[in-house]
Image (tube, rainbow, N blue to C red):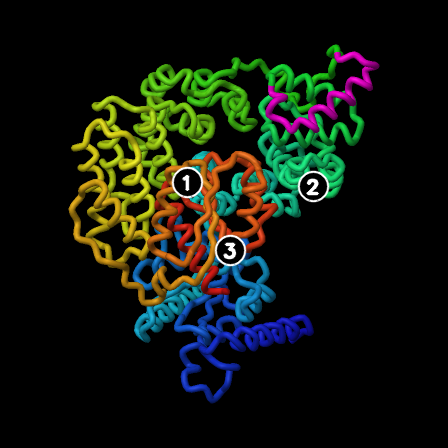
Amino acid sequence: MTQPQEKTREAVETFLERFFGPGNGIWPGLSPDFRYKDRTLPFVEALRRGDDAPVVLPRAYTDRDRFVMYVIARDVSDRAKTAELIRAFAGPTYIAYDEQVGIQPVWLDPDDPVELAILNFFGQRPTFRLDTGRTLDHKLNLANALQLMQRTEARRPPRLWRVAKPVGRLLAEFEASLSAGAEAASGVVLDHLAATGGVTAFNLANLRIKRLDRLGRSEELLDSPDLADVIRQNPPVPVKEAILNAVYAALEEPLADSDLPTARQRLEERGRFVPDLLDIDATSLSAQAITVLLLAASVLEDVPALRQLIEAVQADDRSGELPQLVWDDAVQQLHQADGGSLLPAESEPSAETDASESTEPQASVDSWPSLLAAVAEGSSGGELALKNRTWASWPSPAADDAVLAAYLDSLENQAADEVWTAVGAFIDAVGYETPAGLTAHAFIRNAVTFDRFGPGDLAVLQALTEIALRAAPSTQTYADILEEIGAERSRWISPERAPIALDFVDLLFLAACPDSDARSNLAYNLLEPLWRHQGRLNEADLSFAKRLSEELGVNFTWQTRAGSEQEATLADLPPMSVLLYSLDKAVLARCTEEIEQLAPAVKVLTASDHVGSPQLRQKARSANVIVVATRCAKHAATGFIDQNKTTKYVGYANGSGSASLLRAAVDTLRMAAATS
């Protein structure tokens, strides 16, 4: 045996000593005299042999009655594959999970000695923590299933992992998931994209940056090791905007305090890549991104960039969206550079325009009707408009609602399938302002026709339904929408997907109701499968289902609480504070009421700010747990929360409804309580 192999074996043994050390009573100290060592030995031997299979190791907590199995992927890119193996061998029979988002890896706690050992030895390899019941049979059944998984995977011939969905469909699902606020689903789709091998490392890095921007994780985005390479390769406008948004989060506090020198200092510390982004076309950028560019151009005394930015802001009359002190400083600097004149100067063509874009004649894509037409036809102009978010500077789709809906309904199958790639942009553009109900309804028909019930599709369908119902449809249209939503319910409703079903039912309660019979029928059809399997619902889902049933007059007899063998009730949670962030104030109110009823010791704070504020800063700093709904989230607010939080317990709703936010809040509260 060579020296490197000896070192590897020594490292494995050191890891095993730490893993089975303090905090893990399953095989104390790997003692050869331990009575039950034979139950754990096969998993230990598989690790020592280096089998071509995921690592599986059991743990019995020493400070509570809890048993888990850790499953660790063989490679950082094997997240999706490992999750599928767990589902195939353990599935819903031995473990509980949300079928909508699949089996997800966990964030390991560095303050836990057992999980710290995993972190130190396996690094960033995805790790799954699987819970089961407390009885010996539960534990043995899960262990046997995972042992069979290891043996089967180790003995199979080498093969490549392939994902059936084409790359284009996955990209569309990723974008739509982000727009609909399906955080976990967007992560699953991103893993599938990485597994296909059909997406370059540069494009994958772009997608990860866009996702971090949507989640408001500005610090993580700016610390990304891929950032320099991404900027060097001139990424699309939305990626550049995401980077600028993250920099703005670092500047927002001093700007709010009118402290321009500190803001400039922060820019120099956190915005080292901003000078490379000054040539961007600012037309469709957020106010936060423009603020960063203006401040950078002022610091660098880059007069051409200042002039271009100021002219772009003035052309769209957007100066009121920017911090006054940054705008005044930029205008004053340009005024001095021009010798007291603010007359427009000749400017160079924007470097943002790609050579191929300027030489190839393109049909004009400058409105929502032209965008949908270009996308349906497979035109590169439509693809470019989506890629660069040029639609962000257009009027809302609500202005052309009837035209867009009629066009969508007129499309043949192939074109209708293509145009779905624009649904994420549509949801983003509509937001929570003036709804485009007819177009949303047309997209709902598209989803049902093409069986779009994947990990992110249902959150998209829920967002479209919210838009359609908010538009106050006629009695017949209302009944049609509800009938279409319920037509394929048997294909996607299950206890594991309870939050998305409950989100739909909650929408029925919150929206105006022109047809009570149609509402009652859909509520019954969505709640009935959950009622029949209520023993598999967790405590929060069961409580909310019972509440909705009473509010909508659907007479089911529900249990008083979920019978969970591995978890205490929510009423047992210790005193904590949780901050809920969403732009939907009705959802915040509903979720707050449920948490206060289920967990009386938990103090609930809420926020729906569009930008940072002293109140939001105080809430973020004081919260023990933070939960964010990311649909149409305002980057200034979510980035501000990320900058000011003092807790590591941050959760994200996998949807935009009350039940999704409640599930995320309960899961994150339990995690915080378990590790505190």
Q: Quadrant of residue 405?
A: top left
- Between disc 3 and disc 1, the foreground one is 3
Q: Secondary structure at mark 1?
A: loop
> Where's residue 461, x and y in %?
35, 35
Residue that badge 3 annotates: 624
The stretch of residues the image draws in magenta is: 318-342
> Can residue 15 be seen at all in this image of the molecule?
yes
Distance between the alpha carbons at the discs numbered 1 and 2? 31 Å
**Vertical comparison of 416 with 627: above or below:** above
For residue 228, the mark is: 2
Residue that badge 1 annotates: 165
Horizontally, residue 311 falls left or right of residue 638, namely right
> Which is more toward the observer, 394 or 234?
394
Q: Any magenta on residue 324?
A: yes
Q: Are marks 2 and 3 in contact (CB under 8 Å)?
A: no
- Between disc 2 and disc 3, the foreground one is 3
Q: How many marks?
A: 3
